[in-house]
Amino acid sequence: MCRHLGWLGREASVSSLVLDPPQGLRVQSYAPRRQKHGLMNADGWGVGFFDDTTPRRWRSAAPLWGDVSFDSIAPALRSHCVVAAVRSATVGMPIEASATAPFTDGRWLLSHNGVVDRDVLPLSAAAESTCDSAVLAALIFAHGLDALGHTIVEVGAADPNARLNILAANGSRLLATTWGDTLSILRRDDGVVLASEPYDDQPGWEDLPDRHLIEVTAERVTMTALNPTKG
């Protein structure tokens, strides 16, 4: 399992989204409040952001709470669109930077909070790691993010025990799915946050329903139910 966060709005520092909040991802790496599976997220972390339209990433296999270099740089990293995650590795999966979200196809940044049986996923040379999340990310990229909801329904049907919370961004859109785990939304005056759990106790956070596709743009937030394909 993991905890992840996405931001779309006016330019903000990575530190203000990830490190500074009282219950932000740094705290969630050792004391998550709503995590259903696992006790902490000490198997790595990653932050992706957009430099104009170019995705940039900083990933590590070490716990976020101990990375003093990132702590000193994060206030200077600013972007209008951010995807960040802290990782609790699925049992048997490699612990390495390449297995840590966000993954990318050069246009999108993508994080997976959950678990999926790799046997239901096609092998892909494009996967950044052999871990389940990286193989799933490669499948989603191959199908295209416009088909994200359909892809998640198909994978969920193939593996009924899968948990498939996805968070993806391309700089102008923020997409997410809820499938087996928590996701909350905060609509701020300067943008929108999607997060596995609220990063503070301020009013305004809303819990999102399970098995939904969420899309955030500069104009609106839309939600669509993810229903199994009827045959």
Image (cartoon, rainbow, N blue to C red):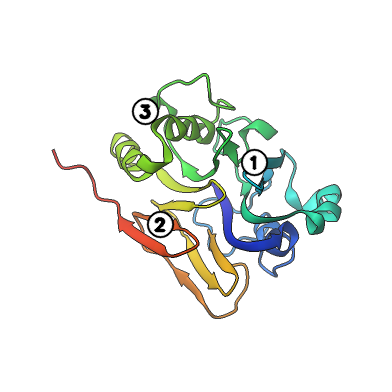
Tell me the mark number nearer the camera, choosing from 3 and 2. Answer: 2
Q: Residues within 10 Å of mark 3 (few under 14, many from 20)?
A: some
In this view of the protein, which residue sits in the foreground, 182 or 152? Answer: 152
Is residue 184 visible in the rendered image? The answer is yes
Tell me the mark number nearer the camera, choosing from 1 and 2. Answer: 1
Position of residue 128 in the picture relative to residue 137 (left or right): right
**Mark 2 sits on what residue?**
214
Q: Amino acid at mark 2?
A: Ile
In this view of the protein, which residue sits in the foreground, 4 or 116? Answer: 4
Residue 88 screen position, x and y as percent: 60, 45
Which element is circle 2 on? Answer: strand
Which residue is at a point 24% across and 50% down the rendered structure image? 227
Residue 122 screen position, x and y as percent: 40, 23
Give the farthest residue toward the left: 231
The quadrant in which the C terminus is found is top left
Give how far apart the Cα atoms at labels 1 and 2 are. 23 Å
Q: Are marks 1 and 2 in contact (CB under 8 Å)?
A: no
Dividing the picture into quarters, in which one does residue 159 lie?
top left
**Mark 1 sits on what residue?**
54
Position of residue 42 in the picture relative to residue 5 (left or right): right
- Mark count: 3
**Mark 3 sits on what residue?**
120
Is residue 224 placed above or below 156 in the rendered structure?
A: below
Which element is circle 3 on? Answer: helix
Residue 112 screen position, x and y as percent: 51, 44
Give how far apart the Cα atoms at labels 3 and 2 are. 24 Å
Dividing the picture into quarters, in which one does residue 197 lie?
bottom right
Task: Tell which circle, 3 or 2, labels the residue nearer the N-terminal end.
Answer: 3
Which residue is at a point 53% across and 32% down the rendered structure image? 134
Is residue 197 visible in the rendered image? The answer is no
In this view of the protein, which residue sits in the foreground, 165 or 161? Answer: 165
